Image (cartoon, rainbow, N blue to C red):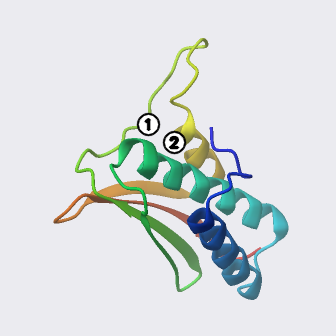
Amino acid sequence: MCDPNLNSPSLTISREALRDAMSRAGYGLTSIGDAELALCELVVNAWRHGLTSSPVVVVVFVDNTLRVTVADRSSVLPEQARPDSFSESGRGLQLVAGLTHRWGAEPQKLGKRVWFELDGAA
């Protein structure tokens, strides 16, 4: 799972930008924390599995929904694994699914985009 204290400048900047945007949009601390952790998982997946040292992160609000997208260079679309009790990895997308309202992945010309959404500020 993602360590939210990872000391990467790009991850730190992305988390700060997400936190600021969500605060301005009226999201509460719990939702912001959930989104930061989900973002961290997607970025770490892009590093580990996406062949990308600097994934592109996009944060947008459409109507009353936050959408965060992380793009990497791998064309392999992720699947939500069902690791056994003894697995030491493979739970990141389960975590993203549990923290957000929706998530998915879309192929791009070069690589893919993995995204999650949170509905309106509560």
Q: Is residue 91 left or right of residue 53?
A: right
Q: Nearer the viewer, residue 28 or 14?
A: 14
Answer above or below: position of 65 versus 71.
Answer: below
- Could you tell which of marks 1 and 2 lies nearer the N-terminus? 1
> Which residue has dot 1 on it?
80
Q: Residue, x 43% and y 42% (percent of image)?
A: 48
Report the label total: 2
Label 2 sits on residue: 93
Q: Which mark is residue 121?
A: none
Q: Amino acid at mark 1?
A: Gln
Q: Residue at x 54, y 14 (%)?
A: 84
Q: Is residue 100 visible?
A: no
Q: Quadrant of residue 122?
A: bottom right
Against 69, residue 58 (above or below) is below
Q: Is residue 24 above or below residue 55?
A: below
Q: Which residue appears at 24% of the width and 58% of the height? A: 111
Q: Alpha-carbon distance for marks 1 and 2?
A: 5 Å
Q: Amino acid at mark 2?
A: Leu
Q: Position of residue 24 (x, y in %)?
A: 74, 88
Crowd rating for badge 2 (residues with CA inside 10 Å; few <14, some 14–19, many 20+) = many
The residue at 66%/66% (across/down) is 12
Q: As drawn, is 7 to the left or to the right of 56?
A: right
Give x and y (percent) for residue 115. 44, 61
Q: Tell me the SS state at disc 2.
A: helix
Q: Position of residue 39 (x, y in %)?
A: 58, 59
**What is the quadrant of residue 52 in the picture?**
bottom left
Q: Are marks 1 and 2 in contact (CB under 8 Å)?
A: yes
Secondary structure under tag 1 reads: loop
Toward the viewer: 87 or 47?
47
Residue 21 in view of the camera: yes
